[in-house]
Amino acid sequence: MKIASHLEISVRSLEEVIKEMKEVTELFIVARGSMKFEDVSTLPLPLILQEVFLNHLIYRAEVMKASFTGGVPQVERDPESCLLGQLIYYIHTVTNNEEIRNLIESIAEPHAKLHTLINDYERFLKEKNPQVKERMEWMEKNLLPYFEEVIEALKRALHLARKLELGE
């Protein structure tokens, strides 16, 4: 099988995963896309963090799909418009737990980079016309480290919030 065929299969698989992830997240919160913090602010913190986590998994899948296809990821570029960006600003209103607050506040910079680097990636595409390998390398070097940092902090915050909710 040719590399192009493998790539087409990978892209189709990734598109299916993205579609399924979006369908699953629809089960959690009704308002999708232009969600604002006030839409979720009355929910328990674990549910807010879960929603943020799922949104960023979709973000990563969209970015990976674009790196396969050579397109520009159709993701939010303004970190303050993103639900996590809003949570970073409002975290003090939803929890008094200092450890959770510190975790969420600690990812403000990597989270902002995660969103604004899409502009750099778009420039990279226009200037270099890179092949798949080069696009994947760019993503792995420039974007994925920020994504991993954000996701790891979100996982820790979600774990702590669930423990608090259970009274542990």
Image (cartoon, rainbow, N blue to C red):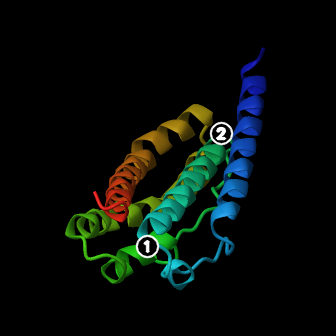
Residue 122 versus residue 136 in the image, above or below:
below
Q: Residues within 10 Å of mark 1 (few under 14, many from 20)?
A: many
What residue is drawn where x is 39% and y is 47%?
148
Quarter of the figure with the N terminus = top right
Residue 131 x/y as whole percent: 62, 36
Give, as a three-letter code, the residue at label 1: Gly
In the structure shown, which secondary structural element does the residue marked by tag 2 occupy? Answer: helix
The residue indicated by pointer 1 is 85
Q: Which mark is residue 97?
A: none
Mark 2 or mark 1, which is nearer the start of the sequence? 2
Nearer the observer: mark 1 or 2; the answer is 1
The residue indicated by pointer 2 is 68
Q: Nearer the viewer, residue 117 or 64?
A: 64
Q: Nearer the viewer, residue 131 or 101?
A: 101
What residue is drawn where x is 52% and y is 85%?
38
In the structure shown, which secondary structural element does the residue marked by tag 1 occupy? Answer: helix
Corner quadrant of residue 35: bottom right
Give, as a three-letter code, the residue at label 2: Phe
Q: Is residue 68 left or right of residue 158?
A: right
Residue 30 x/y as whole percent: 69, 72
Residue 8 x/y as whole percent: 77, 32
Residue 76 x/y as whole percent: 57, 68
Quarter of the figure with the C terminus = bottom left
